[in-house]
Amino acid sequence: MLTTIKIKLLLSFLFVCFGCFSAQKPTTVTIENTIKSGIIKAEKPRIILLADSFLQLKPITVTSFSCPRSAGGIHDYYSEATYWWPDPKNPDGPYIRKDGLNNPANFDFHRQAIGDFSWAVGTLTSAYLLTGKAVYAETAVKHLKAWYVNSETIMNPNFLFAQAIKGVNTGRGIGIIDGIPFIEVTKSIQVLENSPYLSKSDSETIHNWFKTFMTWLNTHQYGNDEMNAKNNHGTWWHTQVAAYARFVGDKSILEKCRKHYVEILLPTQMAQNGSYPLEIERTKPFSYELFNLDGMATLTWLLTDSDFNGWKFSLSDGRGMQKGVDFIKPYVVDKEKWPFKKDISHWDEQPGRRPFMFFAAIIHQQPEWISIWEKCSAEFPTDESKRNMPLKNPILWLGLNKPIK
């Protein structure tokens, strides 16, 4: 029989062991899986409902709409500068700029078509990942082939005629930002390439389309202008190019984007407090601050590999992604605390479920950001809210290569 002393010693030993065990913190993998599970749980009902509605959507590309003011052809993307209006003093002359005020009379059908295409394909691919149902993948592939494969409906791989201004030019480098929705399209393609529903020949054709597009972005003057832009345009040019480089496997272009982020984008755009002054000085400062932070968050995620962690990288003075999300946090929790002027339009639609929120949660292992993300609206009440949320499908960013069911 155990003596009293032996019993006490045994109990002490068990207490210490149990105490050590219970004091162990959840592993990084456990936290990450919990966060990803939370995103899936929150997204699944919405994704399935949307995907079912997109099953009836016929492919619509740039060839579905034309504008007599376009200097391009039927396969060329064309849009007109959002904030440019007729001059009251010279109605038939060149347009003038009114920052933050959208001109509803400008041709915008191609931009809307790209956005709808990306949203549909991303949602259908997400639904395929969540259910394994072939119909979602097959429908997504139909849209991909319309934009990048079929000769009757294909879009030419450039943005020569984007964001044109009546009486001023036939296109501008600024228009390249209209291509942001293609980022999630490439994420969808990477999933569908691992399925039986996207043929090898179609996949190769799509890859070649993006290789040609990426060459244009890196060689044409419009691309050079955007690459060197000092505000969100420079951010999103690099985010697009990094996404396409990862998609086609161009390591040299990816390294070029990484170098530009470290040496130029981060040092010149972010203030010491983590804000982006060039965005805050706009007429819609809150919207642009969020928009640029989304771009930086996506870019650093794309730049991250075994040798470089874009999200954890910071300058010697501490400026980096953590500083950026720390700055904006109190204002997405309660935007009435925003210390700068309110946006002149669409203030009530902000902030929405931003991409930087789920990136912060997953990469920085901060579950609180998922709670914040869930409390924000997942709806898009206007075209403006859809436009300013270019990445709409977090399921595509969870690293899932095949259906979970």
Image (cartoon, rainbow, N blue to C red):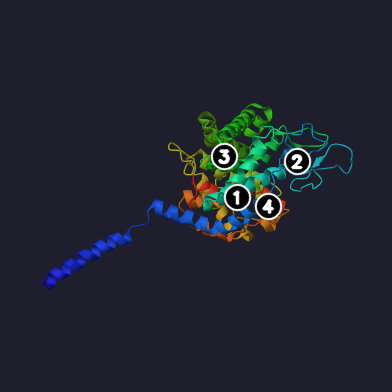
Q: 249 or 134: nearer the eye?
A: 134
Residue 222 visible in this rendered orientation of the protein: yes
Q: Could you tell which of marks 2 and 3 lies nearer the N-terminus?
A: 2
Q: Could you tell which of marks 1 and 2 lies nearer the N-terminus?
A: 2
The amino acid type found where label 4 is placed reads: Ser
Residue drawn at x 52%, y 58% is 41
Structural distance between the alpha carbons of marks 4 and 3? 31 Å
Q: Could you tell which of marks 1 and 4 lies nearer the N-terminus?
A: 1
State which mark lies toward you, 2 or 3: 3
The amino acid type found where label 1 is placed reads: Thr
Residue drawn at x 13%, y 73% is 4
Residue tagged by mark 2? 64
Q: Position of residue 67 (x, y in %)?
A: 81, 38
The amino acid type found where label 3 is placed reads: Leu
State which mark lies toward you, 1 or 4: 1
Q: Could you tell which of marks 1 and 3 lies nearer the N-terminus?
A: 1
